[in-house]
Amino acid sequence: MDPQPVTRGLPSDIAQSLIVARYELLKYLRSRRFLIGLVIVTLGIAPTYILPPALGSPYTGTAANEPLPLWTFPPGLVLANLSHRGVDAPSLVLALNGTPLPSAGAWQFNATFNAVVFYPGLLQGNLSQYAVTASYDWATDPVEFAGSFLQFLQFLLVITVTFFAADAIVSEFSNRTGFLLFPNPARRSALLGGKFLASLGLTLLLVGLYYALIAGLSWATLGGVASRLGLSFVFALWWSAGAVAVAFLLSSVLRGVTEASVLTFFLFLMILPIIDVVGEAVGIEFWWSLTFTLPVATNILEVPYPGDQVIDAGPGFQLTLFSPDPGVSSLVVGLYLAGALLVAYLLFRRRQMLG
Amino acid sequence: MTRTFGDLVAVNQLSLEVPHGSSFGFLGPNGAGKTTTIKILTSLLSATSGRAWLNGLEVTEDPKEALASVGSVVETPEFYPFLTPRETLTYLGRLRGMAGDEIATRVSEVLDQVRMSEWIDERIGKFSKGMKQRVAIAQAMLHQPNLLILDEPTLGLDPRGMVEVREIIQQLHKEGYTVFMSSHLLAEVQEVCDQVAIIQRGKLVVSERVTDLSQRESSARLEVLTLEPFSDSQLDTVRPQAGLDGLYRAGPTKLVVDFTGDLVGRAALLERIQRAGIRVASFRAIGGPLESLYMELVEDSR
């Protein structure tokens, strides 16, 4: 008897990629790395949220009868700065010698300068004779609030890329699991696609959780969320995709899991950032560096988008703090994503189970 | 096909045909090129030159289609430690295009066949090498391929496991599956396979049916156990026997004979020993025809 092979249609490459992605995700979700990732998310959120109020800088408060220093500018314009930003304008009450001052026609709050502008007119001449005080509710600006958490973003992204992408390819060879996976009727492109989706999915999960916690805390604490936090999240994910592709490239070249993980970690946390700092020192914009583009995720929260800053860093020495252009940076990340993934695929396709 | 690694020629213009429905043993010393050949057949390695076909489909050109109806165990594969046998086999079954119901049924069947049912939902990370080898064999059979390529399938198994795997392979062979297996164990190949090929230094030395080996006139080493100790003069009486290449005392009641000849010649040798007054308790070839052929053809190992 010569048995006929059980004939069944093979799944398409895309369907196989999704199958690979599903089980790669399952592998990672059960690994200790995922738990460590959750701990790191917690460590990024909890101290940043708890420490400022614990050290005497609450996120919200009420200023009662705060004395206002007055600044007089010609021709007779008088300004008074408030000590807290994020003033709840409707709650603002000014008083002269303890007597509340009606706002209509006398003064106006300017949120941009965080200052009260007194109109020239009835009170102007006598203003310096009075003790001017202000009472108001204030809350930290949601942009500032979110920005303080996003300082941890680079470390979180590098950790997730290292944990969930650096060994994705090399482990099949060094851990010998390729002997199980590669003799299956699936193209290397399908396997690579599935692994890439899984790595990106894990990044989405952890970084998404991080952003969700920021938004939730901002809403609960300040009653609002930075309007461009979603854009920041989208850029962070886009950046992750580029970084995962670079990690895959290293993973398809290197021979061991440890060296791939260590090199990925240091590339994004030390090597490229050092190059960026050198650029700042000499005033050259290394727009092509992947880590140079990452501040877009923080800067994009601000309206208007901030420009470059030159700061004195010692006698005769200046640093240029570049503000990467969002459009150029997105394009650079896209080029890293496409280029690194293509080279990773070509190397992976040629790589053989020699051991 | 040929495969080189730098100056080393691992597989040297090897040309081999495995008939449908055969159980084909692939033998050779360490470094002969057995595993390299199997890796090329399973798309783990590319050939430097040449081509290979599985079920008539060229694996070197289109591995996805060629491997669709092939099950393989290459070396002792490692598994994903956080997955269970059920999950691992389901994963591979989906990649091979099996439907959900079919996977569920087959996973139970094949794990039962390799005696791993009670571990079906345990994570593989804590399995022994032998347990992993059983799961590896189960995944090879999962999608009911008509061709099984097995590289040392009993490696790492305990004696009972080896017997069970041999029985599985024999059963599959009886059902008409084509089995192509490499092994160091000549007795195992002789027991399980109906055809063998021997390679040395990457080159094919011989390929023939196992049944033909016993018909073939070749050297054999015979072991003779006697009831009582025998003398040198009795041995001298035996030495003139035709076909006798060597006669050695292996113990007070044990004699080893290197003999070239067919079964009729062996019967004459036995009669001569008995005529010399040596009372024979047992007379048998050591290793069988395959071992004799192997020892005759294979010079050394790398």
Image: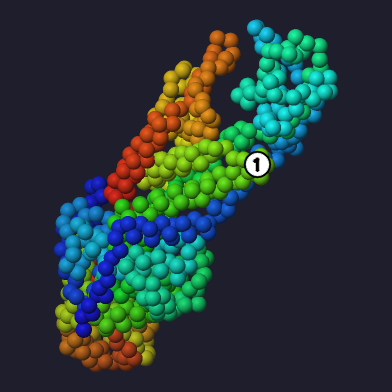
Residue A44 on image: x %, y %: 61, 42
| Left or right, residue A162 beside residue B89 | right
Front-most of residues A296 and B229: A296
Q: Which residue is mark 1?
A: A223
Front-most of residues B81 and A112: A112
Front-most of residues B183 and A113: A113
Residue A38 on image: x %, y %: 58, 50
Residue drawn at x 52%, y 20% is A309
Residue B7 on image: x %, y %: 23, 47
Identify whether B196 is placed above or below A161: below
Quadrant housing the N terminus of chain B: bottom left
| Left or right, residue A177 beside residue A137 | left
Q: Amino acid at mark 1?
A: Gly
* Image mark 1: chain: A
Q: Is residue A261 visible?
A: no
Front-most of residues A85 and A9: A85
Residue drawn at x 31%, y 91% is B280
Quadrant housing the C terminus of chain B: bottom left
Identify whether B179 is placed above or below B282: above
Graded by Cα atoms within 10 Å as few (under 14), some (14 to 19) or many (20 or more), the crowding at tag 1 reads few
Task: Kindly state the secondary structure of the residue where label 1 is placed.
Answer: loop
